[in-house]
Image (cartoon, coloured by chain):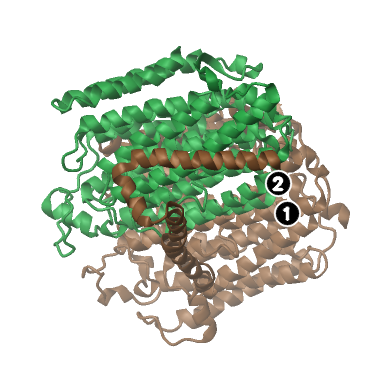
Chain colours: A brown, B green
């Protein structure tokens, strides 16, 4: 057992980047330049800024594709290349390079980020066409792409941290894009703060690595990680996991992600579904040589994944806000990915495969939701939708394909990626196989339920919006979105259909990733066989669809949310009380503490010091007199001071 | 000679500018001219400083030393190491910016710009003296003398409670200075016993450190420490700073928090550690506790502030905690981080002060609750606030990240517990910055200061919360061209030093290595240099 579950990783040799790879800095430099130009040019760029934003990301995608093709020509053993640009922070024995690691794992992410990123930039040209802040939007979106590329391309932990907080900033700016909405500002701040809690974990992990190994470069750390004692190793993995939880919306730091839906919908698709929130999965895959060494660390990773995938699926069933359902779906799906990478060598490639497939279908689903909102005056309440399939056929079909991919309809992406994770979960040792496997399968049933509910409420049934008015009192006139929006949706729908098969067929992705995360290991045993799990999952998913049909499809949906409801539904509507707990345990005591300290500081500390000063000076009145005749008093004080000095010296002399 | 010129030029400038009461426009031009020439000369100094010499063991460069009061063995001795050099550069950059900020600032009744700018120049000259002195008595003299122009700037040009704040500032500093004087004289006496003839020369005193008994070191250390802990305020010596920072005019506040307070942390590095190495190590736990308390306490108080200038002051108390942590964690990385932090904090807090000043100039109120939704009428101002805030919360990509990272990563191997507690402070930093941003800049346009300014079409101090909203933003203007020019160099430095700290670190590194040697410790983590 231990042979599989705790072992040193065979490391690839690191080559210096040549050819196209030596231009890898263009990947992040192009969108960074785009962001800079758009920020500095200001209003002058309003007319063309969005196209510049699109152009830089497309160019970045082309560069990434060229590097990818070049890498494919290389022998797998030579596919790990590094490009050190300059010494970023160098003091004595510490030298942090501004350097890039161009290997299969980072290139996979580069293609996902720039590919989906380019599509969503194009979509945003249409989606944001009426928004006066469009230029600012594209500047911030470009900033995000640059930071995300730094995150995945860095060749050391500090570069990772730079990208890590960089995407956090972009996310903060974009969640709060509608600055005049207090809810958006609050959600943005909450996202940044909860991310920073995770960042503390990542930061301390970096400090521990430095103190244990004297380096922060990936290659040197992975080479030496075997020297670290087990307790320190477990600590490092848990601290990294805390970072992953913050960025990826995993338990116990999940509650910011649904609130992040305050941002414009393309942001939800790109940052809060396809790319940034998967950074936690990337982190664990990237540091696989560390996680491979500790079974305890990985067990906790899996626990977090399983708890989160259940939380997300349960809450997803209760919301009526289309974006929040998708957000909790994202929380849940990333839970699957975390579970997969927690399995270690068995699961790294599975986690990444699901991450890529999810990147396609979840981005597609969000863009579809955006298309619906675009058509419905920014309405997000599904109770006010209904029967939209006829009015928005392209949106309906692309959204429908994403839906099928997500619930794991045979032949589509989720079937190959999500269901494989469930199969793998049953191979965890001992009780873990049963618990994790069954939980993951159960959540697949819940996924089918909440997504079918969403489909039925949005696209089928009666047109509940007919008799309603928007908040501004206008009628709803649903219509299909323009081609600049439906184009990206179609591309992503195609991806949702085929990505899963193409990535997993013949272990294509696993073989490609092997230099970065090791060969995909065969599980030692399985609680249930592959066929048994597939059947179980399909049955549960079918039950979920059926339940949704019986509960939602067959009866009219009330426009107002029914109250009161049963206890479980109440709990799910309140995010399983995550916000209430944060509020009670942290926010409120924190506010009181801050207020109390302000009071103490103004009265107590100051009063004490003033009192002492007054005592020394004889009376506070004499202190006030200093304002007028301070020079004389200064001299007097000096004299007094000198007396003190002499006294002190004598004391020392005779001591 | 170069250092003497750097020291005297602003002082001469002060004497030239201050009497120009008749022609205020000329006075400010002349003052800015002096500051710009000083900036150029500082650049020349930077170029004259040899990193290679420093690395090969030259402790001070550009030295000048003449006997001053032979009876006491005091010398007028100047010289700089890398840390002093970067501080000189910081002053030289900030003073012209502060002048450009105050170019049209409304001054209290009966006060002249010539007087104000003269005091700015005087402060600049004395600060050069403090950082360049290599004679301990000379250092003490500058240390006390620099209080005087700052006292007048706060007391004459400050806000409504300026008298109270100025006196409080003066008394605290004076008390610290006197206690330090005791130790300065103590050093002289001790050196007399050691060498037969007392001396104030830093290098001689440093040579004596090895043979000074620990008990004596502790007494002398405490004298310096209290003075420095008041100056770069560590809790509980900090309460003068929020008052002084809030009441000082913005320009003086920038110099006060940005540079003058750094004399304290500079003093830790230059005087406490090398002159009293044993005492420094023995008492380090005490300082570390105060540092960590400062980080958390300062941050929690910043969260709860209702006055924007006091807010900036409390964020600085938290930052001074980080600097002190790095200094008393005894590693090359932490030392370098602290030294770099002094520069970075000057830039980021300086900018934060200036942006807050711009806001107050528009709204006529310091209260947070009087503002809201400013990003609507003044998006550039809001953006500048965010940049300064991000630098303050040590966002990677800004200057402060590099220094805070170095402090923490360098402190962890020796002091894991304190470092972890300090790292929690980065969450609080995000909270105080972003919450302040949310309250003042985001959300619907609101608050008496914003609405009042919008209604009247201009700033003022008479605030009527009942005024009706006029939301076109005409009375709450965005940044003017001059204001953009004031902020641009700061923004550029903040971002460029975030990605390219190399030039500054190269200058600092040999000096912190020397300090490590003087303390007599080796790095807890050797590192692979890769």
Seen in the picture, residue B376 relative to A650 is either above or below; the reply is below
The answer to whether marks 2 and 1 mark residues whose Cβ atoms lie closer than 8 Å is yes
Residue shown at 35% from the left, 18% from the top: B9
Q: Is residue A196 visible?
A: no
Q: Quadrant of the C terminus of chain A?
A: top right
Count neighbours of disc 1 (C-alpha within 10 A) and say few if under 14, some if 14 to 19, many if 20 or more: some
Q: Please state if A190 lies on the left or on the right of B324 as rendered.
A: left
Same-chain check, marks 2 and 1: yes
The residue that label 2 is drawn on is: A208
Q: CA distance from mark 2 to mark 1?
A: 9 Å
Q: Nearer the viewer, residue A449 or A625?
A: A625
Residue A343 visible here:
yes
Taking the spot 80% from the left edge, 70% from the top edge, the residue there is: A431
Total numbered labels placed on residues in the image: 2
Image coordinates for residue B368, horizontal then vertical, percent: 31, 57
**Image coords of residue A453 (percent x, y):** 48, 74
Chain-order first, disc 2 or disc 1: 2
Above or below, A433 against A346 in this view is below
The image quarter containing residue A346 is bottom right
Residue B336, relative to residue B40: is it above or below?
A: below
Which disc, if any, is residue A112? Answer: none
Direction from residue B265 to residue A480 in the image, left or right: left
* Element type where label 2 sits in the image: helix
Residue A331 rendering spot, x and y as whole percentages: 56, 62
* Quadrant where the N terminus of chain A is found in the figure: bottom right
Which residue is painted at 78% across and 43% down in the image?
Answer: A225
Residue at mark 2: chain: A
Q: Mark 1 sits on what residue?
A: A235
In the rendered image, the vertical position of residue B485 relative to residue A571, given as above or below: above
């Amino acid at each position: 057992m231990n042979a599989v579950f705790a072992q040193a990783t065979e490391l690839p040799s690191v080559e210096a980047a040549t050819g196209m790879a030596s231009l890898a800095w263009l990947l992040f430099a192009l969108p960074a330049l785009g962001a800079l130009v758009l920020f500095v040019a200001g209003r002058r760029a309003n007319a063309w800024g969005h196209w510049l934003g699109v152009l830089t990301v497309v160019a970045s995608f082309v560069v990434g594709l060229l590097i990818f093709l070049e890498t494919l020509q290389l022998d797998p053993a030579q596919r790990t290349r590094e490009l050190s640009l300059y010494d970023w922070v160098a003091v004595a024995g510490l030298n942090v390079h501004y350097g890039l690691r161009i290997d299969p794992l980072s290139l996979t992410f580069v293609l996902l980020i720039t590919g989906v990123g380019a599509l969503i930039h194009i979509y945003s040209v249409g989606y944001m066409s009426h928004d006066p802040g469009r230029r600012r939007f594209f500047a911030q979106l470009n900033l995000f792409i640059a930071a995300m590329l730094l995150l995945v391309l860095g060749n050391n932990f500090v570069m990772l941290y730079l990208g890590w907080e960089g995407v956090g900033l972009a996310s903060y700016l974009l969640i709060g894009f509608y600055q005049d909405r207090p809810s958006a500002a609050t959600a943005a701040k909450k996202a940044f703060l909860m991310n920073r809690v995770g960042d503390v974990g990542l930061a301390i992990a970096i400090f521990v690595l430095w103190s244990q190994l004297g380096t922060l470069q990936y290659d040197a750390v992975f080479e030496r990680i075997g020297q670290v004692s087990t307790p320190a190793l477990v600590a490092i993995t848990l601290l990294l996991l805390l970072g992953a939880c913050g960025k990826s919306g995993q338990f116990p730091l999940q509650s910011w992600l649904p609130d992040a839906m305050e941002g414009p919908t393309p942001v939800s698709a790109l940052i809060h579904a396809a790319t940034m929130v998967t950074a936690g999965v990337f982190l664990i895959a990237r540091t696989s040589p560390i996680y491979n060494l500790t079974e305890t660390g990985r067990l906790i990773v899996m626990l977090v994944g399983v708890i989160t995938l259940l939380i997300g699926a349960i809450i997803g069933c209760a919301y009526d806000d289309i974006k929040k359902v998708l957000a909790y779906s994202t929380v849940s799906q990333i839970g699957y990915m975390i579970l997969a990478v927690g399995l270690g060598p068995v699961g790294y490639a599975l986690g990444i495969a699901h991450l890529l497939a999810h990147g396609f279908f979840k981005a597609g689903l969000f863009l579809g939701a955006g298309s619906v909102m675009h058509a419905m005056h920014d309405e997000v309440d599904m109770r006010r939708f209904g029967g939209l399939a006829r009015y928005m056929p392209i949106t309906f079909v692309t959204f429908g394909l994403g839906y099928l991919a997500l619930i794991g309809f045979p032949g589509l992406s989720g079937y190959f990626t999500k269901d494989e994770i469930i199969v793998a979960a049953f191979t965890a040792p001992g009780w873990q196989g049963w618990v994790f496997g069954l939980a993951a399968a159960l959540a697949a049933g819940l996924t089918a339920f909440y997504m079918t509910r969403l489909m039925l409420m949005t696209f089928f049934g009666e047109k509940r919006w007919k008799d309603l008015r928007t908040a501004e009192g206008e009628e709803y006139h649903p219509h299909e979105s323009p081609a600049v929006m439906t184009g990206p949706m179609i591309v992503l729908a195609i991806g949702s259909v085929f990505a899963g098969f193409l990535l997993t067929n013949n272990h294509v992705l696993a073989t490609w990733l092997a230099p970065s995360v090791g060969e995909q290991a065969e599980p030692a045993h399985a609680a249930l066989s592959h066929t048994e799990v597939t059947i179980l999952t399909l049955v549960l998913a079918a039950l979920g669809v059926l339940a949704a049909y019986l509960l939602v499809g067959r009866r009219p949906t009330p426009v107002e949310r029914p109250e009161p409801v049963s206890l479980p539904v109440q709990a799910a509507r309140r995010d399983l009380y995550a916000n209430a707990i944060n509020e009670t345990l942290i926010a409120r005591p924190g506010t009181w503490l801050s207020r109390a300290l302000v009071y103490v500081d103004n009265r107590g500390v100051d009063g004490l010091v003033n009192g002492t000063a007054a005592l020394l000076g004889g009376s506070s009145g004499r202190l006030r007199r200093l304002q007028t005749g301070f020079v004389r008093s200064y001299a007097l004080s000096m004299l007094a001071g000198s007396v003190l000095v002499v006294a002190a010296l004598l004391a020392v002399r005779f001591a | 000679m170069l250092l003497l010129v750097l020291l005297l030029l602003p002082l001469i400038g002060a004497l030239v500018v201050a009497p120009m009461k008749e022609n205020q426009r000329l006075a400010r031009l002349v003052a800015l001219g002096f500051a710009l020439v000083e900036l150029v000369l500082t650049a020349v100094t930077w170029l004259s400083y040899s990193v290679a010499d420093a690395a090969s063991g030259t402790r001070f460069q550009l030295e000048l030393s003449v006997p001053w009061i032979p009876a006491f063995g005091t010398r007028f001795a100047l010289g700089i190491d890398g840390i002093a050099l970067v501080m000189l550069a910081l002053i030289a950059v900030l003073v012209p910016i502060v002048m450009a900020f105050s170019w049209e600032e409304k001054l209290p009744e009966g006060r002249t710009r010539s007087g104000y700018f003269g005091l700015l120049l005087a402060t600049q000259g004395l600060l050069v003296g403090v950082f360049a002195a290599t004679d301990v008595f000379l250092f003490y003299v500058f240390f006390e003398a620099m209080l005087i122009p700052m006292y007048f700037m706060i007391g004459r040009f400050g806000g409504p409670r300026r008298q109270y704040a100025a006196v409080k500032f003066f008394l605290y500093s004076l008390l610290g200075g006197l206690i330090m004087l005791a130790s300065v004289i103590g050093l002289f006496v001790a050196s007399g016993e050691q060498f037969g003839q007392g001396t104030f020369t830093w290098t001689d005193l440093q040579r004596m450190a090895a043979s000074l008994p620990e008990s004596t070191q502790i007494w002398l250390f405490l004298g310096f420490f209290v003075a420095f802990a008041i100056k770069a305020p560590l809790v509980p010596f900090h309460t003068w700073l929020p008052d002084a920072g809030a009441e000082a005019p913005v320009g003086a506040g920038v110099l006060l928090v940005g540079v003058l307070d750094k004399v304290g942390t500079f003093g830790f590095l230059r005087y406490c550690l090398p002159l009293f190495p044993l005492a420094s190590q023995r008492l380090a736990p005490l300082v570390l506790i105060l540092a960590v308390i400062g980080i958390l306490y300062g941050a929690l108080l910043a969260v709860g502030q209702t006055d924007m200038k006091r807010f900036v002051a409390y964020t600085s108390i938290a930052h001074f905690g980080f600097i002190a942590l790095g200094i008393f964690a005894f590693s090359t990385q932490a030392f370098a981080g602290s030294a770099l932090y002094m520069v970075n904090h000057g830039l980021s807090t300086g900018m934060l002060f200036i942006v807050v000043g711009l806001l107050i100039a528009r709204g006529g109120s310091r209260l947070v609750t009087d503002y809201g939704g400013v990003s609507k009428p003044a998006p550039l101002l809001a953006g500048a606030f965010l940049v300064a805030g991000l630098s303050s919360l040590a966002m990677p990509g800004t200057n402060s990240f590099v220094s805070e990272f170095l402090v923490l990563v360098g402190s962890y191997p020796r002091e894991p517990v304190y470092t972890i507690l300090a790292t929690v402070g980065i969450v609080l930093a995000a909270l105080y910055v972003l919450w302040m941003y949310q309250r003042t800049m985001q959300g619907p346009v609101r608050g008496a200061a914003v609405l009042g300014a919008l209604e009247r079409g201009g700033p003022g101090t008479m605030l009527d919360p009942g005024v009706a909203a006029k939301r076109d933003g005409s009375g709450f203007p965005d940044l003017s061209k001059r204001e953009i020019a004031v902020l641009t160099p700061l923004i550029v430095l903040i971002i460029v030093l975030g990605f390219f700290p190399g030039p500054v670190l190269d200058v600092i590194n040999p000096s912190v290595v020397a300090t490590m040697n003087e303390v007599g410790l080796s790095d807890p983590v050797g590192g692979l240099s890769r």
